[in-house]
Every structure is written in C-alpha cells, then in structure tokens.
Image (cartoon, rainbow, N blue to C red):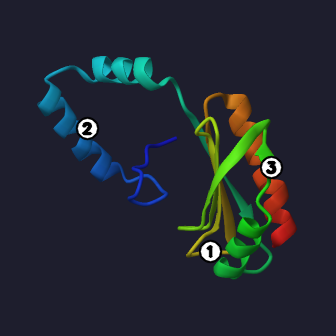
Amino acid sequence: GGISIRGHIPEGDGVLMGLLILEMLAHYRQPLSVLVADLLAEVGPAYYERRDLRLAHPVEKRAMTRRLAENAPERIGGEAVVEVSTRDGCKYILADDSWLLIRPSGTEPVLRVYAEGRSPEMVQALLAFGEEVAQAVT
C-alpha cells in the first residue's frame, strides 16, 4: 500500500505525506479518523495496486509509450477510456476515474503496471489488461 500525491511522483513519498497529514490536522483541528470519514463520504473508496513485470532486457521508454498510446483501447473492464496521458509512461484514464499506468522503471529492467479503481474487481481487471498489453509491447 501507500499514498502518492498527484503531480509529485508516481511512487509513494512517506515523508512528504506525513508532513501534509500533520498540516491538515493542524488546519482542520479534527482527528485523522474524522478527516478520513469525511473524505470517504465525499468521494467514496478507491483501490490501488501495482505489479512489477521483470523484463529480459530494458525497453526504450518513449517508443513503448508511443506504441501504447497509439493503440489505446476504447474500453477497459467495461469502462470507456476517455483520456490517454504520456507524461510518465502511458496512462489510460477511464470514464469512472479509474486509471491504468504502464511505465518502465528508471533503475532496473522492470515494467511497472499501476491501477486505481472504485472496486477491487476493477483494479484486477485493469491490472490483467495492463499485463497483457505490456507483454505484447516488450
């Protein structure tokens, strides 16, 4: 598990997250349990998982990202793909705000497949699709 911050880095940053939580606690003067309950009541739950696929050889990030973007699916797990971002790998954003990101590691021969969805089942569908597509382009 972990928490990442949109626009920061695609991995978790525990130190920054801890500081932001402390800032929120000071600002709102509410226990963390109340802030979390309020957030879940407003936006609902989100589920996240990452899988690492070992590669026999490194892949060229730009070429792989371009192939994934050019061959973007219309739907994944029954949801329409409404946006494709190539900011850091290839990210498919779905109509229900679920998303799938496929990108090579910058430090080892690993392809990372990230998914976030409104249910554990959607996350598994996204990851299965991501693994299938990733293996086809490597």
**Near-viewer residue (13 or 127):** 127
The secondary structure type at the circle numbered 2 is helix
- Compared across the picture, whether 122 is left or right of 13 comes to right
Amino acid type, mark 1: Glu
In the displayed structure, 78 sits above or below 29; it is below
Name which residue lies at 59% across and 67% down: 86
* Sooner in the amino-acid sequence: mark 3 or mark 1: 1
The residues bearing labels 3 and 1 have C-alpha atoms spaced at a distance of 23 Å
Q: Residues within 10 Å of mark 1 (few under 14, many from 20)?
A: few
The residues bearing labels 2 and 3 have C-alpha atoms spaced at a distance of 34 Å
Name which residue lies at 67% across and 30% down: 120
In the displayed structure, 111 sits above or below 45; it is below
Name which residue lies at 85% across and 56% down: 132
Instruction: Find residue 41 and report its image quarter.
Output: top left
In the picture of the structure, the residue carrying the numbered disc 2 is 21
How many marks the image carries: the answer is 3
The secondary structure type at the circle numbered 3 is helix
Residue 66 location (% of width, % of height): 70, 74
Choose mark 1 or mark 2, whichever is in front: 2
Tell me the quarter of the image containing the C terminus: bottom right
In the picture of the structure, the residue carrying the numbered disc 3 is 129
Residue 51 location (% of width, % of height): 68, 52
Residue 131 location (% of width, % of height): 79, 55
The secondary structure type at the circle numbered 1 is loop
In the displayed structure, 63 sits above or below 65; it is below
Q: Could you tell me if the residues under marks 3 and 1 are in contact, i.e. CB atoms within 8 Å?
A: no
In the picture of the structure, the residue carrying the numbered disc 1 is 108
Residue 89 location (% of width, % of height): 61, 67
* Sooner in the amino-acid sequence: mark 2 or mark 3: 2
Amino acid type, mark 2: Ile
In the displayed structure, 95 sits above or below 42; it is below
